[in-house]
Image (cartoon, rainbow, N blue to C red):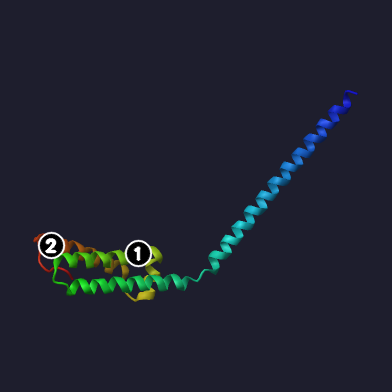
Amino acid sequence: MQGVPYKQDIGLLVRTFMNQVHLTKCCIVVTVVVLIISLISRLLVDSSNVSTKGAYLVDKAMYWDELAHAENDPLLRIEHCANALAFMNAAREVATDVELETAAGIDISKTLRRLERNVVAAREAKSGRAFNRIG
């Protein structure tokens, strides 16, 4: 009689182990399936849409830059320069510089440096340390 409970305990251990193995296999399969679906969805995303949004933001940056050049009020000039820089940085968050250069047709790093200089020049013009250095 002593051997019977022992056999039941081993059977229970085997069933428990098999359930854990089965559960582990199911978790691995679900993880792999989710990973594959994620990769497929990334491949199917239209990258031209991202470039289009980035080019739109670059165009808005150039619009604000033109307004800054035409503005005589130093405070509004600072605001327009800051808006231009903000739109350019937003465009760089949406797409890579290469995509933006292809879509917008301008040198992004050169334009970004120019916009940063314009903000500094507009601040200096407001404080009276410089006059009309925006360019």
Mark 2: amino acid: Lys
First in residue order: circle 2 vs circle 1:
1
Image coordinates of residue 28 in percent, x first then y, are 66, 50
Disc number at residue 25? none
- The residue indicated by pointer 1 is 90
Q: Is residue 4 above or below residue 101?
A: above
Image coordinates of residue 56 in percent, x first then y, are 36, 73
Image coordinates of residue 134 in percent, x first then y, are 17, 69
- The residue indicated by pointer 2 is 126
Is disc 1 placed on a helix, strand or loop?
helix
Q: Are marks 2 and 1 in contact (CB under 8 Å)?
A: no
Is disc 2 placed on a helix, strand or loop?
helix
Q: For this view, does 5 lie left or right of residue 100?
A: right
Q: Rounded to the nearest whole Å, what is the CA distance between mark 2 and mark 1?
A: 25 Å
Residue shown at the point (30%, 64%) measured from the top left = 86
Residues packed near mark 2 inside 10 Å, few (<14), some (14 to 19) or many (20 plus): some
Where does the N terminus fall, quadrant-wise? top right
Residue situated furthest right in the rendering: 1
Q: For this view, does 125 lie left or right of residue 39?
A: left
Residue shown at the point (64%, 57%) measured from the top left = 33
Mark 1: amino acid: Ala
Count the marks.
2
Residue shown at the point (24%, 71%) measured from the top left = 65
Q: Nearer the viewer, residue 128 or 79?
A: 79
Q: Nearer the viewer, residue 52 or 71?
A: 71
Q: Is residue 116 above or below residue 29?
A: below
Residue 69, located in which quarter of the rendered image?
bottom left
Where does the C terminus fall, quadrant-wise? bottom left
Image coordinates of residue 15 in percent, x first then y, are 79, 39
Residues packed near mark 1 inside 10 Å, few (<14), some (14 to 19) or many (20 plus): some
Residue shown at the point (25%, 71%) measured from the top left = 64
